[in-house]
């Protein structure tokens, strides 16, 4: 089964590396491999078997506790350095949720109370499903970020993000610097690409993001005649759809590369596929303290894009676990 899932995953990646199902198929391959190894554990010497059981069963429980503490600490850092928005609180809330689950499981084991045990099993079933999907997302997002876009593109699209008092913040500057590097590399290879600054004006912004981004690009050597502005979008999906219209107008049959931050690259790639944009997505570096909350936010957005399936499975597992644990 592990080999079968791996083969299907590789075929799917070859067809289009921007699918979320690629992440799930690779995750299923790894899960089946682990189950297969556990099924043959009786063939190992007792000492080796004990070590395997520890790392497969006990180490993850310890890792959950360590991860919860890390997420809580990161959440406090986000509160100190960033605004107290829901998106910036996600790492703190995730850490609090994991710690609550650990306490609930320990309490159920200690008290042996049927109702507490049923709630604990129900929560564990739901969290296990979401954790599996998150591990799939995280692993494939890391892999996707290592897959380089092929050279020979006609457009380099920079996805916008919030500007502060008309200035380019570090998060957006890293995207623009990455786009400038890609543009220069294409020119050095003999190409003649355009750069598209994509971003509209938010309610707390003094001008469209595309205009501030264009000023930055011009100041760093991108020629004005090779710079296009898409200044109407307010979401990533609109960034990509409206940029596609620009590309089709200037060069039908185009190929492009989309630039965003590394935590956003895989979800942007999924959205690019949905918007029928002919190109891959690359990620620019992000401050380490910002990465956990941003990654959780991106994962939550992917889950909510398939909310009917994921919420149904999560609810079904939670109810099944609760009923199964009742005496």
Image (cartoon, rainbow, N blue to C red):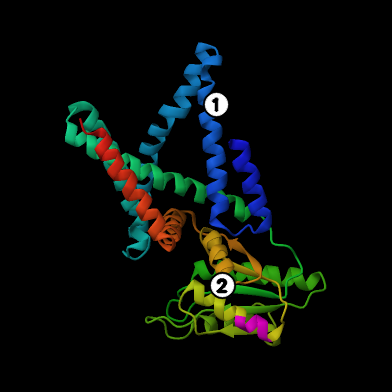
| SS category of the residue bearing label 1 | helix
Pinpoint residue 148: horizontal percent, then vertical percent. 69, 58
Residue at 63% from the left image edge and 47% from the top image edge: 8
Q: CA distance from mark 1 to mark 2?
A: 41 Å
Question: Left of 227 or right of it: where is 212?
Answer: left
Screen quadrant of the N terminus: top right
Q: Is residue 6 above or below residue 299?
A: above
Q: Is residue 205 above or below residue 60?
A: below
Q: Is residue 285 above or below residue 228?
A: above
Q: Which residue is mark 1?
A: 37
Kindly indicate the quadrant of the structure image that contains residue 247: bottom right
Magenta range is 245-249
Pinpoint residue 283: horizontal percent, then vertical percent. 59, 61
Question: Left of 306 or right of it: where is 126?
Answer: left
| SS category of the residue bearing label 2 | loop
- Which is the main secondary structure of the residues drawn in magenta? helix
Q: Which residue is mark 2?
A: 275
Residue at 43% from the left image edge and 76% from the top image edge: 164
């Amino acid at each position: 089964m592990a080999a079968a899932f791996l083969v299907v995953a590789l075929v799917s990646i070859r067809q289009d590396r921007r699918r979320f199902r690629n992440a799930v198929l690779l995750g299923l391959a790894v899960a089946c491999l682990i189950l297969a190894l556990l099924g043959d554990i009786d063939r190992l010497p007792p000492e080796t078997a004990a070590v395997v059981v520890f790392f497969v069963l006990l180490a993850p429980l310890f890792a959950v506790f360590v991860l919860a503490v890390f997420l809580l600490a990161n959440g406090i850092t986000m509160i100190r350095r960033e605004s107290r928005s829901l998106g910036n609180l996600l790492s703190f809330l995730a850490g609090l949720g994991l710690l609550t689950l650990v306490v609930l499981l320990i309490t159920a084991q200690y008290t042996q109370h049927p109702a507490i045990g049923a709630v604990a099993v129900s929560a564990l079933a739901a969290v296990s499903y979401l954790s599996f999907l998150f591990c799939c997302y995280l692993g494939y997002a890391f892999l996707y970020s290592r897959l380089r876009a092929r050279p020979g593109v006609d457009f380099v699209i920079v996805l916008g993000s919030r500007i502060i008092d008309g200035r380019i913040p570090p998060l957006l500057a890293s995207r623009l610097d990455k786009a400038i590097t890609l543009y220069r590399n294409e020119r050095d290879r003999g190409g003649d690409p355009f750069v598209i600054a994509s971003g509209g004006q938010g309610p707390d912004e003094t001008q469209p993001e595309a205009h501030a981004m264009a000023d930055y690009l011009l100041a760093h050597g991108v020629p004005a005649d090779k710079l296009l502005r898409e200044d109407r979008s307010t979401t990533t999906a609109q960034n990509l759809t409206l940029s596609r219209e620009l590309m089709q107008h200037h060069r039908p049959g185009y190929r492009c590369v989309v630039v965003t931050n590394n935590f956003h690259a895989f979800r942007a790639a999924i959205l690019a596929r949905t918007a029928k944009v002919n190109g891959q997505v690359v990620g620019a570096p992000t401050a380490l303290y910002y990465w956990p909350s941003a990654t959780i936010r991106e994962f939550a957005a992917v889950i909510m894009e398939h909310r009917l399936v994921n919420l149904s499975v999560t609810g079904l597992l939670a109810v099944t676990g609760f009923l199964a644990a009742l005496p």
